[in-house]
Amino acid sequence: MDQKISHHLLLCAMSTTGACCDYSLGLETWKRLKGIVKELGLEDSGRPEGIVLRSKVDCLRICKEGPILLIWPEGIWYKKVTPKRVERIVYEHVLRGKPCRDWIIRTTPQAFI
């Protein structure tokens, strides 16, 4: 049986080129993203809405205003994602379905994937 997936969160925060953000801020943001997903049980295979996947990626080719967080399936890209912002994004966007409009840098249609 295939696992149902609610969202996939891709965080570009610790690029090897270091062009988009401060490495230490990226690392702290990644740690908080992992923590909040775990704390809220979003990786639980029994979650009716499906699991939330999270991936640390090297580069999303924005190269400014990072850390950058891309959330599928909506195709919403967030800029300047700090540990506090990532927490709010998870609560508002992932759990409540209300994107945090002030931090959106771009959107890409679902057909893009």
Image (cartoon, rainbow, N blue to C red):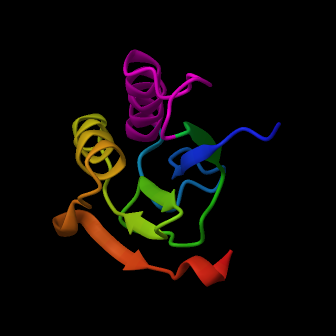
Q: Position of residue 32 (x, y in %)?
A: 38, 27
Image x and y of residue 63, in percent = 50, 69
Relative to 66, is 63 on the left or the right? right
Quadrant (top left, top right, bottom left, bottom right) of the C terminus? bottom right
Residue at the image point whose x is 53% and y is 63% from the top: 73
Q: Is residue 58 left or right of residue 37?
A: right
Residue reaching furthest right? Answer: 1
Residue 5 part of the magenta-drawn span: no
Q: Which residues are magenta?
A: 24-49
Image-based side of 33 in relation to 93, left or right: right
Q: Is residue 26 magenta?
A: yes
Total of numbered circles in the picture?
Answer: 0
Closest to the observer: 20 or 8?
Answer: 8
Task: Residue at 66% x, 49% y: name it.
Answer: 16
Q: Between residues 12 and 49, which one lies in front from this camera angle?
A: 49
Q: Residue furthest top?
A: 39
Q: Position of residue 54 (x, y in %)?
A: 57, 39
Residue 47 position (above or below residue 18): above
Name the foreground residue: 108 vs 105.
108
- Quadrant for the N terminus, please: top right
Residue 109 in percent (x, y) is at: 52, 82
- Residue in the image at 20% along x and 68% along y: 101
**Within the image, what quadrant is residue 112 found in?**
bottom right
Relative to 13, is 99 above or below? below
Of 82 and 97, which appears nearest the observer? Answer: 97
Compared to residue 39, the image places residue 16 above or below, namely below
Magenta stretch: helix, strand or loop mostly? helix
Give the quarter of the image for residue 100: bottom left
